[in-house]
Amino acid sequence: MRLLAIESSGQLASVAVIEDGEILGMKVGEFKVTHSETLMPMIDAMLKEAGVELDSLDAIAVSGGPGSFTGLRIGSATAKGLGLALDIPLIHVPTLHAMTYNLLVPDYIGAIIVPMMDARRGQVYCGIYDFVIRPDNMVDFDIFMDADAMSVTDLLDRIKEITDLDGNPPIVVFLGDGVMAYHEVIEQYAQFNFDYAPDEAMLQRADTVALLGQLMYSLDMTVSADEEAPDYLRPSQAERERAEKENR
Amino acid sequence: MSDTVILSIESSCDETAAAVTLNGRTVLSSVIYSQIDLHTIYGGVVPEIASRAHIEKINPVIRKALEDAGKTLDDLDAVAVTYGPGLVGALLVGVAAAKSIAYAKNIPLVGVHHIKGHVCANFIEYPELEPPFLCLVASGGHTHLVKVVNHTDYEVIGRTRDDAAGEAYDKIARAIGLGYPGGPKVEKCAHNGDPKAFSFPRAKIDEAPYDFSFSGVKSAVLNTINSYKMKGMEIDEKFQADVAASFQQSVIDSMKERVLMALDEFGMNKFAMAGGVASNQTLRAALKEAVEVRGGQFYCPKPVLCTDNAAMIGAAGFYEYMNGKRDGLDLNAVPGLKL
């Protein structure tokens, strides 16, 4: 089973190709270069280097949001066009879940994992998750709080409720570009043990989109290329302002 | 020469459109999803809402264009797409979809200038029309007077210095309470009005005789409305109609003067209109008369080819394709693309 993965929700776009759990190729874009210019050439170069024919793909996984509206749309439109032309399904991978999969390594089993993306306007797109080992040695992915937009102080409150419930608070690990934007707030207000993800796991990555995409594919969690659309989490500014006016 | 079948995509503003054309001038299918209902409550196009709607509609619109034409992606010789000017977020959706289809099918990608597309709508409407000719492209976002030298070389001889013609219509419509979109509403309202009721300015720019300016007439209309209100008078239907008719007359006069002057100066005989504003029947009739009185030939596509559509992008794309234009996978949306 071969799958192409596209991640363009943040400042750094990346693409990966995976076959039965093995990453055959991956490319990461450059900062400050638009995804529109780099995404397709990266896909082309990566597939060529990996010796993968486009026609041999079974599906395309796309990081489905939240994230930069424009970035998400470039990834989505690219995946939709490829899905249409190749007549293969798409997999809509929640961006925050894929980021959490960056930390699916023994060191972080049992830790509370909090991906957070800078969402501007004093907020982050965030979620609260963990991986635990079941008695049969399988790994469970738990969702304490799924994708939402809130201030970092509100997020810290939510994390505290969860760690307090646990009695023996595990470590909380933050990742995402929200860490760069808000680490001072975390350091000032967090009332629990916390750490930051290592550099290589800090940002969105197409290889974890691919891994999670493959898992979702095996569970038949696919969408058609026509249906796929990003999860923006937020309405447009015009819709928001209109709603605020009506509520006044 | 073998036939050339092109899939074209247009998403520069608030229409998601795809078409299949044969040799540039025969439209095998043209599908347009208009988002107008999504934007009406905001009184204008909201870029983020437009971009989101494009994502939702792009694939079904492309699929329908292929179905209607009885073609599959394997029948295509190239994919043409509008890459500017327009709203960047909106353009990006069409550009990304076009690139991935061209890549997956291993066929050429041709980026098309939106204004050239508008001009080329005339090639679809008039199979015998050949350059050179003069063309006035007027829409909600553009007002250009263009010398069409050949199918792919265009020389801009005049452009608006401020508002586009269609934008001026929208603003006037809002000011006299007609709502959005302004073009058809002002035109309809003007039918019952006196075009000489008010004398609104016809702006001229000294060093650029072919350039347009519609902000002066807009201010004059707004001043007229304000002074009317200050006198305690109500904006009734007659006032609306007179303002609409007088405003429209000022737009017509500005266009007529420049068009006739350009036909003379460049020794041209053929004049074509294009763009959404060209679907205004009053304006078409006035310019047709002016050009024909002078002994010239007048061209203007039917309204569905005037407003944004992908068939016109297919026509322009065909000529660019024949001229050897090929774009790479790094093609980007260029919101301020120059002609």
Image: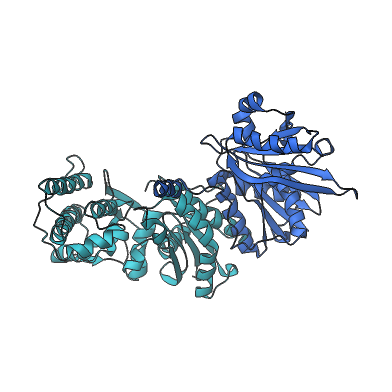
Chain colours: A blue, B cyan
- Please identify the quarter of the rendering in which residue A193 is found: top right
> Is residue B151 among the parts visible in the rendering?
no
Q: Is residue A20 left or right of residue B42?
A: right
Q: Is residue B221 left or right of residue B27?
A: left
* Residue A19 higher or lower than B25, as above or below: above
Q: Residue at x 26, y 43 (%)?
A: B161
Residue A43, x across and y down, in percent: 66, 49
- Please identify the quarter of the rendering in which residue B120 is found: bottom left
Residue B174, x across and y down, in percent: 26, 53
In-front residue for pair B4/A174: A174
Q: Is residue B214 left or right of residue B232?
A: right
> Which residue of the protein is positioned furthest toward the right in this rendering?
A136
Q: Is residue A197 left or right of residue A149?
A: right
- Please identify the quarter of the rendering in which residue B73 is found: bottom right
Q: Residue at x 61, y 61 (%)?
A: A225
> Is residue A158 among the parts visible in the rendering?
yes
> What number of labels is visible?
0
Residue B317, x across and y down, in percent: 45, 60
Residue B237, x across and y down, in percent: 16, 61
